[in-house]
Image (tube, rainbow, N blue to C red):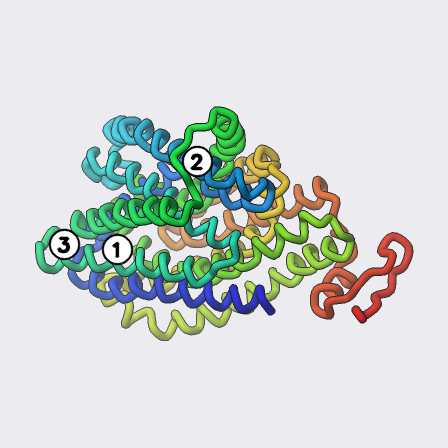
């Protein structure tokens, strides 16, 4: 029940923080042309591309450290992680500019200086995630939710001022995203200092550990970036900024399902880490039980979400983006597959088997890119949406298959696992007895 309560709080925060950009979506699709909206999508792609490098995924290390390290080590460990995130971001920004200057069609001809802004925004988001993830590990969902909603409100508020009052168009929206990210990262650093959850520190041993943790994640996270955005990169290069704008608007609306899946995972991870730490046989059964029931639950929720979006998409998107409505079912289905993947990938993070996870995601990304390419050539933008769903499904399948082969969990006892999860059963001797006994 504690997990469900936390999940409800995270879901409410996710929905509230996502609702503000969704409220902005009908305005942007009426004020901006599809080509201008394509520049907003391109800026988001740049941020996503920079994220694995601008921060080295230190937020993941911060979340796990709360469970694996003595409490007196946490402030110095977190301080070192924040310094690493800032340093990596400053290195990535000029490299991103050079890449965009060499291949402008990748980002619908967005001016190269925006690449540096995107890198700084990505690094700022990593710093904010460090604060959010630590509260998540500390099981403080209200603080997490409040900061998350504040970030979203500031993001949209600054964007409205820039787009409507100053008349800066797509540049105003992108600038609002960047300025709000930097402001929230600064606020997160202040909260870290006041709470003493982080102290300014550059511990060489911690730095080496965090680099060893983060470097193997780069191919994994990059593979995830490719899986999540390869459809948009290919739409940009093959179909142009106008179609990218229409496609991106549909993808934004279809993110509802991914947001709900993310809310579940935020509540699920502390529960999962606590049970993985015990190594108890009954806890292992419950972990497997969650994974087995996740797929049908996510797919059923996706069907409900699709029905709701089908009836409201015309109001939210407007007539110039009507083509995006046909793509929505595929974006929602991809979100459901993402939820299944999240359930399994968390096991890799706790066990610090990030290189193994990277091998799964890189393989899925390579296959997914081929699938998307073929589908775009065959069906155009609609094929890209189908390809997005397919790549998320491939990722979930690969990650789960490798986990079954690599982690000592009762994967082939689905009935006992689900029973243990649903009924809170206690296994007196799981190696010998197939029966479940109720807790006293």
**In this rendering, position of residue 161 left or right of residue 378:** left
- One can see residue 2 in this view: yes
Q: Is residue 297 left or right of residue 75?
A: right
Residues 49 and 366: in front is: 49
Q: Is residue 51 above or below residue 15?
A: above
Q: Which numbered disc covers residue 155?
A: 1
Viewport quadrant of the N terminus? bottom right
Frontmost residue, 374 versus 294: 294
- Horizontal and vertical percent for residue 436? 83, 66
Q: CA distance from mark 2 to mark 1?
A: 25 Å
Find disc 3 in the rendering and name its residue.
162
Seen at 25% across and 30% down, the residue is: 97
101, above or below 131, in the image: above
- Sequence-first tag of 2 and 1: 2
Foreground disc of the pair 2, 1: 2
Secondary structure, mark 2, is helix
| Camera-nearest residue between 73 and 178 | 73
Q: Residue at x 74, y 44 (%)?
A: 408
């Amino acid at each position: 029940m504690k997990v469900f309560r936390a999940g409800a709080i995270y879901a409410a925060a996710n929905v509230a923080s996502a609702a503000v950009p969704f409220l902005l979506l009908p305005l942007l699709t009426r004020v901006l042309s599809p080509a201008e909206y394509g520049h907003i999508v391109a800026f988001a792609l740049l941020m996503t591309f920079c994220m694995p490098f601008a921060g080295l995924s230190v937020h993941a290390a911060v979340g796990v450290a709360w469970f694996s390290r003595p409490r007196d080590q946490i402030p110095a460990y977190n301080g070192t992680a924040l310094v690493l995130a800032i340093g990596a971001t400053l290195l990535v920004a000029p490299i991103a500019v050079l890449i965009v200057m060499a291949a402008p069609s990748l980002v619908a001809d967005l001016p190269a200086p925006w690449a540096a802004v995107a890198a700084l925004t990505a690094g700022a988001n990593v710093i904010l995630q460090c604060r959010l993830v630590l509260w998540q590990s500390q099981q403080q969902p209200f603080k997490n939710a409040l900061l998350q909603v504040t970030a979203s409100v500031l993001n949209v508020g600054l964007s409205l001022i820039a787009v409507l009052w100053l008349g800066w168009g797509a540049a105003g929206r992108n600038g609002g995203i960047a300025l709000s990210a930097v402001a929230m990262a600064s606020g997160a650093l202040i909260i870290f200092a006041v709470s003493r959850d982080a102290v300014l520190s550059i511990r060489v041993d911690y730095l080496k550990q965090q680099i060893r943790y983060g470097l193997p994640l780069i191919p994994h996270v990059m593979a995830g970036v490719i899986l999540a955005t390869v459809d948009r990169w290919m739409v940009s290069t093959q179909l142009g900024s106008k179609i990218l704008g229409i496609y991106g608007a549909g993808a934004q609306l279809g993110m509802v399902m991914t947001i709900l899946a993310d809310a579940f995972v935020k509540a699920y991870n502390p529960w999962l880490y606590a049970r993985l730490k015990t190594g108890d046989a009954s806890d292992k059964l419950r972990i497997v039980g969650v994974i087995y029931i996740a797929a049908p639950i996510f797919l059923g929720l996706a069907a409900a979400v699709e029905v709701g979006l089908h009836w409201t998409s015309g109001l939210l998107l407007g007539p110039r983006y009507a083509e995006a409505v046909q793509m929505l079912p595929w974006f929602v289905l991809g979100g459901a597959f993402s939820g299944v993947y999240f359930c399994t990938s968390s096991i890799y993070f706790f066990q610090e088997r990030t290189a193994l996870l990277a091998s799964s995601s890189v393989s899925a990304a390579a296959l997914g890119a081929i699938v998307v390419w073929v589908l775009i050539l065959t069906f155009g933008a609609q094929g890209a949406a189908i390809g997005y769903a397919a790549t998320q499904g491939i990722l979930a399948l690969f990650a789960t298959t490798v986990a079954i082969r690599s982690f000592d969990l009762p994967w082939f006892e689905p009935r006992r696992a689900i029973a243990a999860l649903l009924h809170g059963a206690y296994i007196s001797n799981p190696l010998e007895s197939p029966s479940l006994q109720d807790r006293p």
